[in-house]
Image (tube, helix red, strand yellow):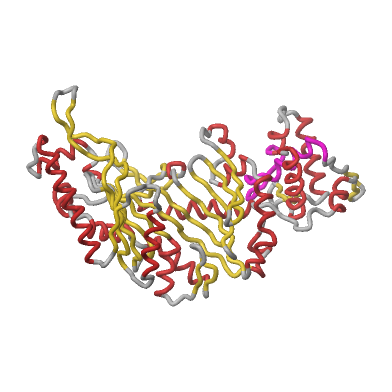
């Protein structure tokens, strides 16, 4: 569906950028038992004295954070229950003084953690450095940051002082828009209007050129009082990696009513017409290897209090579509980057380096690739959106493709729309994987018939393709022996599959 061209007169603009991003920070040298032992030795700490040493470090960190909170005129609260929403409490505190920038509130709570400690090893009858899953005190520091907007910084108060940072791409953009004097209005984490969409998109793209890790390092050094000492001994500070990343494209309409007219039917039609093959192809996968995929492919349609939302998942990664005020949002969430590739220098065993495609890691330096992949998924998804006809299919159109026609003295039969083979043919040629490069005789017959190399089958599919062309359901791609659906063909087939799938499910 060419949604941008079909509704061009009703669209204000399009904006693509990061949405919610969760960044984890690890002091890698303290995650390893051998290196952690080296750190203790450099501090002249005997293993038997580790408990008192660690408690002093934890107390010093807690005292520093609480004093940091007081110095910034922020509120300090201890959370007695994990059921209480920390985000809601922080927002309530912020509403008391909504013009304040910097630290807003610090909340502490005991939560599960993975800590480094010293334990008795039964196998050696000695004390040793080990990693242990337990609980400890965490601090959540909520900021209205001058650079990132609303965000929080979460830190573990026991070794190895793991950190989590939450930032919101739309909040970040709003701060950049303010600096560039771009006028905008926001609704529920989306821009309902922007004075200059082209300039706004250029600013959104410029985020990828910023060294975000420098900003994270600066913030961590203010909060973790032990960073300088750890960096002096171990030579490294925090390693920043992406835990979860959302990237969204907002298609902003002039009025909410312009979107409401077709949105509900678009969601419903997408749910019933997209197949597993379509979902697989959205994520840039070669469809011929789908049988090797061991994860889950799923579709989920829900009517929430905010409106309808449709979500397609491939393993742990997902693409979803929903509406926000006058914006249609298509959003990609990457939780497992190893499902995608990145082109980078790789060191071989002999010490030489070569550039090649390898599974993508979680390093914050790969955010540019997160954006590239997300944009491609969104573009495929938008391109694959089914044609919708708000007045449904005209009966005459169905009658026309059901009746025989004569073209240049040659007679072509009509399609039996109740025949399962016909519906299967329509399903094959409307798959998302054929959107860009189209399909040919081999593609169709291999999916439609078992004995696909039989000359009779080849000739039969040739006649089917010819019939589809003469009924104006498909068209030939210039200079190639491939075909793709016409606008009329996609509209009719999408609606037919919608109604037949509805009947099957009911």
Q: Is residue 439 left or right of residue 142?
A: right
Q: Position of residue 55 (x, y in %)?
A: 16, 45
Magenta highlight: main SS: helix
Q: Residue at x 39, y 74 (%)?
A: 179
Q: Nearer the viewer, residue 455 or 253?
A: 253
Quarter holding the N terminus?
bottom right
**Would you say residue 7 is visible in this rendering?**
yes
Q: Nearer the viewer, residue 320 or 105?
A: 105
Residue 431 position by quadrant: top right
State yes or no: residue 439 in magenta: yes
Q: Nearer the viewer, residue 289 or 260?
A: 260
Q: Is residue 326 left or right of residue 79?
A: right
State yes or no: residue 506 in magenta: no
Q: Is residue 445 above or below residue 313?
A: above
Quarter holding the C terminus?
top right
Q: Position of residue 77 (x, y in %)?
A: 30, 57
Q: Position of residue 155 (x, y in %)?
A: 28, 51
Q: Position of residue 480 (x, y in %)?
A: 68, 48
Q: Is residue 470 left or right of residue 432?
A: right
**Would you say residue 239 is visible in this rendering?**
no
Q: Is residue 396 left or right of residue 388?
A: right
- Magenta residue span: 418-443
Q: Residue at x 88, y 49 (%)?
A: 399
Q: Residue at x 19, y 22 (%)?
A: 123
């Amino acid at each position: 569906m060419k949604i941008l061209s079909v509704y061009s007169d009703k669209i204000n603009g399009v904006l693509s950028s990061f949405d919610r991003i969760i960044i984890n920070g690890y002091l890698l040298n303290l995650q390893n038992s051998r290196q952690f032992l080296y750190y203790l030795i450099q501090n002249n700490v005997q293993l038997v004295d580790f408990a008192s040493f660690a408690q002093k470090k934890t107390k010093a960190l807690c005292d520093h954070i609480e004093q940091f909170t007081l110095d910034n005129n922020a509120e300090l609260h201890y959370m007695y229950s994990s059921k209480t929403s920390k985000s809601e409490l922080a927002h309530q505190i912020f509403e008391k003084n909504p013009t304040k920038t910097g630290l807003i509130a610090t909340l502490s709570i005991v939560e599960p953690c993975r800590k480094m400690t010293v334990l008795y090893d039964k196998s050696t009858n000695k004390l040793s450095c080990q990693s242990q899953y337990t609980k400890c005190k965490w601090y959540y520091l909520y900021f209205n940051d001058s650079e990132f907007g609303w965000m929080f910084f979460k830190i573990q108060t026991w070794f190895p002082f793991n950190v989590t940072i939450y930032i919101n791409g739309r909040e970040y953009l709003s701060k950049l828009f303010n600096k560039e004097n771009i006028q905008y209005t926001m609704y529920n984490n989306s821009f309902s209007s922007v004075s200059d969409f082209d300039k706004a998109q250029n600013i959104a793209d410029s985020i990828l050129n910023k060294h975000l890790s420098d900003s994270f390092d600066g913030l961590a050094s203010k909060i973790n009082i032990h960073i300088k000492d750890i960096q002096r001994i171990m030579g490294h500070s925090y390693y920043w990696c992406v835990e979860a990343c959302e990237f969204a494209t907002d298609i902003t309409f002039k009025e909410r009513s312009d979107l409401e007219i077709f949105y509900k039917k678009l969601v419903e039609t997408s749910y019933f017409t997209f197949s597993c093959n379509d979902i697989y192809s959205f994520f840039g996968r070669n469809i011929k290897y789908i049988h090797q995929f061991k994860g889950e492919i799923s579709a989920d349609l829900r009517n929430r209090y905010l409106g309808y939302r449709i979500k397609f998942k491939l393993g742990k990664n997902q693409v979803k579509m929903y509406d926000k005020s006058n914006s249609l949002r298509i959003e990609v969430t990457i939780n497992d980057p190893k499902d995608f590739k990145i082109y980078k220098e790789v060191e071989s065993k002999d010490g030489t380096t070569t550039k090649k495609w390898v599974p993508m890691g979680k390093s914050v330096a790969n955010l540019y690739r997160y954006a590239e992949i997300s944009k491609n998924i969104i573009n495929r998804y938008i391109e694959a959106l089914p044609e919708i006809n708000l007045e449904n299919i005209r009966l005459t159109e169905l009658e026309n493709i059901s009746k025989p026609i004569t073209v240049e003295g040659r007679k072509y039969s009509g399609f039996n729309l109740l025949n399962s083979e016909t519906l299967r043919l329509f399903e094959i040629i409307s798959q998302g994987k054929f959107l860009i490069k189209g399909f040919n005789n081999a593609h169709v017959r291999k999916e439609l018939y078992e004995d696909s190399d039989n000359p009779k089958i080849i000739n039969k599919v040739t006649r089917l393709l010819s019939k589809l062309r003469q009924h104006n359901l498909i068209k030939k791609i210039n200079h190639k022996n491939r075909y793709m659906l016409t606008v009329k063909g996609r509209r009719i087939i999408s609606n037919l599959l919608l109604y037949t799938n509805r009947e099957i499910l009911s």
